[in-house]
Each structure stands twice: as structure tokens, then as C-alpha cells.
């Protein structure tokens, strides 16, 4: 599990996160794609789910706190992984990050 900002910097990572710096940098590239999609008349995505060749799923959940955007990234072998599973966690993170910015 990894929390990163829109610049691609890791803010927090679980102890078993594999190469969080690289994962955060790659995750931030998805924000560029998320910004481009609405330019073509489609709704802006708030999540991406990717599957690699080994079968691992990587879920990237985009959210905002104030004017800043963040990504919650989760890597799993569980094929039931869904961005909806993380709505409660994202809600708590939004609140915590918004409070932290108000100081």
C-alpha cells in the first residue's frame, strides 16, 4: 500500500511495499491520463486497475484534499480488488490530509 502526491512523491508506504519511490513516480503518470480523458467527452476517472503479466493487480485510487491530488496505490494478487473497497479509507485520508493542510 502506498500513498503518494501528484508530483510522484511517496508520502507513506506499508512495510512490504516494493520500491515505493518508483511506484509513486509511475502512479503520478496516471494523473496525466486522467486529465486527458475528459477532453474527449468522457467522465474523469477516479481509479485505474492494472494487471501485470504475473497476474498481480495494482489499483490506483485518485482523490483530492483541498487543492491537492493524491493517489492510494494497492498491489494484490486478489482478483476481487476493486476501487470501491477503498472508499472508506480514502474518505478518512481526505479528512486527515485536509486537516494537515489547515495548520
Image (spheres, rainbow, N blue to C red):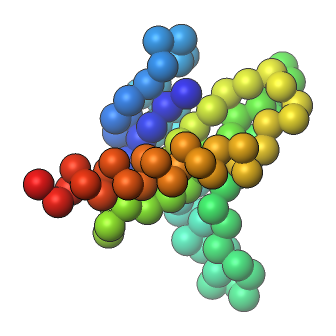
Left or right of residue 85: residue 77: right
On-image quarter of the N terminus: top right
Residue 75: x percent and y percent?
Answer: 67, 27
Which residue is at a point 66% across and 55% down the rendered structure image?
Answer: 47
In the rendered image, the residue lying farthest to the left is 103
Residue 70: x percent and y percent?
Answer: 44, 52
Residue 27 visible to an observer of this rendering: no
Left or right of residue 13: residue 38: right
Which residue is at a point 73% across and 24% down the rendered structure image?
Answer: 76
On-image quarter of the C terminus: bottom left
Q: For this rendering, which residue is in front, 50 or 11? A: 11
Q: Quadrant of residue 79?
A: top right
Residue 92: x percent and y percent?
Answer: 46, 48
In the rendered image, the residue lying farthest to the bottom is 41
In the rendered image, the residue lying farthest to the top is 16
Which residue is at a point 54% across and 11% down the rendered structure image?
Answer: 16
Residue 102 visible to an observer of this rendering: yes
Q: Is residue 55 above or below residue 59?
A: above
Q: Quadrant of residue 45?
A: bottom right
Query: How many circles with numbers are drawn on the protein?
Result: 0
Residue 14: x percent and y percent?
Answer: 48, 19
Q: Is residue 52 above or below residue 98?
A: above
Amino acid at each position: 500500500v502506498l500513498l503518494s502526491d501528484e508530483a510522484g512523491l511517496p508520502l507513506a508506504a506499508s512495510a512490504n511495499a516494493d520500491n515505493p519511490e518508483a511506484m509513486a513516480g509511475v502512479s503520478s503518470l496516471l494523473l496525466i491520463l486522467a486529465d486527458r480523458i475528459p477532453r474527449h467527452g468522457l467522465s474523469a476517472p477516479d481509479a485505474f486497475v492494472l494487471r501485470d503479466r504475473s497476474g498481480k493487480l495494482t489499483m490506483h485510487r485518485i482523490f483530492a484534499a483541498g487543492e491537492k491530488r493524491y493517489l492510494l496505490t494497492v498491489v494484490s494478487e486478489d482478483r476481487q480488488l476493486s476501487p470501491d473497497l477503498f472508499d472508506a479509507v480514502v474518505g478518512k485520508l481526505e479528512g486527515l490530509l485536509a486537516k494537515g493542510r489547515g495548520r
